[in-house]
Image (cartoon, rainbow, N blue to C red):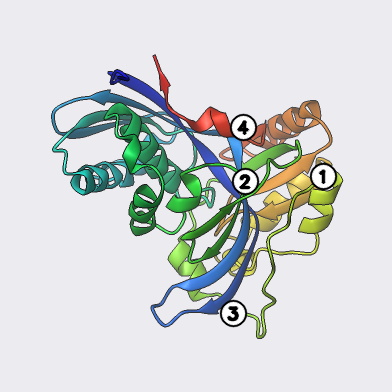
Amino acid sequence: MATRPERLRVAAPAKINLFLHVTRRRPDGYHDLQSLVAFADIGDMLVMERAIGFSLDIEGPFASGLAGDSDNLVLKAARALDEYLGLNEGAHVTLVKNLPVASGIGGGSADAAAALRGLIELWHRPEARGHDVNAIAARLGSDVPVCLPSRAAWMEGRGEHVKLLPQLPDAHLVLVNPGVAVSTADVFRRLVIAENAAILTPPDAFTTFADLVGYLQTTRNDLEAPARTLAPVIDTVINALTHEGARFTRMSGSGATCFGFFESAERARDAAARIEKANPGWWSRAGQFAMAEAVWPQRF
């Protein structure tokens, strides 16, 4: 019989919408979309400990952005799982907030998904994996289901339909956020949906990095144009990445974080450092796609 851990560390990697097409507005007010989603080896971290009741501490460079949030999505996820399982358990969670808040890279959703993964391990409830935890994730937010596995995936519906894809080719990337929070709701209010929006089918696989870039060049992020009306600095971010030699650039999610692909890890690191130095107040990080096994809880 497996022993229950007392303490876990759980990664919450940044979500990157490599493309994002919005196909229609639904009668329930949500939008149907299609997106190819990847995850970076850059993100938040949760430390989880067994406890009586639920409590949350927030640390890290962007902790102040969540100050006063008495019902953080991490706590909502914990309570929802506990209620579903009928456990009356508890946990103390320390969230190390490394990602900018409201930045289009799924920080809150990734944190909630990491909480679900971690608590299933902390409470030793493997039976909750699969459909049950996916249903809880979908109720928490549109991006939480795809953040649960935190690996390359095809996302549809309002985000609840997720098809896992083979590991993407190695890519060296830079994430840049200009220090401007963008409201997803405000972006969608400014969205004009193209008539007869094309419905794509998931790709089988990408053999090389060039294949991936070639495919992405045939796609778009439909939220980028309305986001630019709220945060014109997005243009400046894209131009900075292009100036540094990025082979492909795009905004992720509803913004304002943008990403760029580079030829090598060294070029990505140099570009991230130069961009942040030249733009005080911006956040810029170099990395690559996260490996699937890196997101699972680790005892320590």
Upstream in the sequence, badge 1 or badge 2?
A: 2
Identify the residue at horizontal 65%, vertical 85% (top origin): 195
Q: Is residue 272 visible?
A: yes
Quadrant the N terminus occupies:
top left
Q: Secondary structure at mark 1?
A: loop
Upstream in the sequence, badge 4 or badge 2?
A: 2
Identify the residue at horizontal 81%, vertical 31% (top origin): 264
Q: CB of mark 3 within 8 Å of CB of mark 2?
A: no
Label 1 sits on residue: 207
Upstream in the sequence, badge 3 or badge 2?
A: 2
Identify the residue at horizontal 46%, vertical 44% (top origin): 148
Label 2 sits on residue: 152
Label 3 sits on residue: 192
Amino acid tagged 4: Met
Residue 254 placement: quadrant? bottom right
**Circle nearer the viewer, 3 or 1:** 1
Q: What's the distance in space between the residues labelled 3 and 1, CA to CA? A: 34 Å
Q: Is residue 64 visible?
A: no
Q: Residues within 10 Å of mark 4 (few under 14, many from 20)?
A: some
Label 4 sits on residue: 291
Amino acid tagged 3: Val
